[in-house]
Image: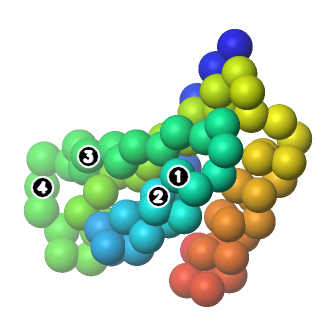
Amino acid sequence: MEIREKIEFADLPLAVYQEIAAHLRQVEGVEVGLIPQTSQVFDYNQSQIGGLWIEYTPNSGSESRQLVEQILGYYKTRYRV
């Protein structure tokens, strides 16, 4: 069974989301994609991206999930989100 989660960090630029996705794609059993921004009104202070999705494939284990949490924790601390 595949499990998909949506991750959103307020005010992070597109480049940082791409960096996070690149890190997460290195984790075995994890697939990642970017979610487009859905707002109809442009706001310079809003992220260019709506978030990212993380999907755990059947061959992902608890080690993969723990590594994902560590990576996300790093970015939460670094960017204070």
Q: Secondary structure at mark 2?
A: helix
Q: Is residue 12 above or below residue 21?
A: below
Q: Amino acid at mark 4?
A: Val
Q: Dividing the picture into quarters, in which one does residue 60 lie? A: top right
- Report x, y in % for residue 58: 71, 21
Amino acid type indicated by mark 1: Arg
Q: Give the CA distance from mark 1 to mark 2.
A: 6 Å
Q: Earlier in the sequence, mark 2 or mark 3?
A: 2
For the point 18% across and 75% down, which residue is it? Answer: 44
Disc nearer the start of the sequence (1/3) = 1
Do the residues bearing badges 2 and 4 touch, measured as CB atoms within 8 Å?
no
Contact check, label 1 and label 2, Cβ < 8 Å: yes
In the image, taking residue 29 as reference, residue 55 lies left or right, namely left
Label 1 SS: loop
Percent across and percent down for residue 48 are 24, 63
Task: Read off the residue under disc 1.
Answer: 25
Q: Is residue 13 left or right of residue 74?
A: left
Q: Which residue is mark 3?
A: 36
Task: Tell me the quarter of the image containing the N terminus.
Answer: top right
- Which tag, 1 or 4, sits closer to the chain's start? 1
67 lies left or right of 45: right
**Residue 15, image x, y percentages:** 32, 73
Q: Amino acid at mark 3?
A: Pro
> What is the C-alpha distance between the residues marked 2 and 4?
25 Å
| Residue 75, picture quadrant | bottom right
3 or 4: tag closer to the N-terminus: 3
Q: Can the viewer see residue 11?
A: no
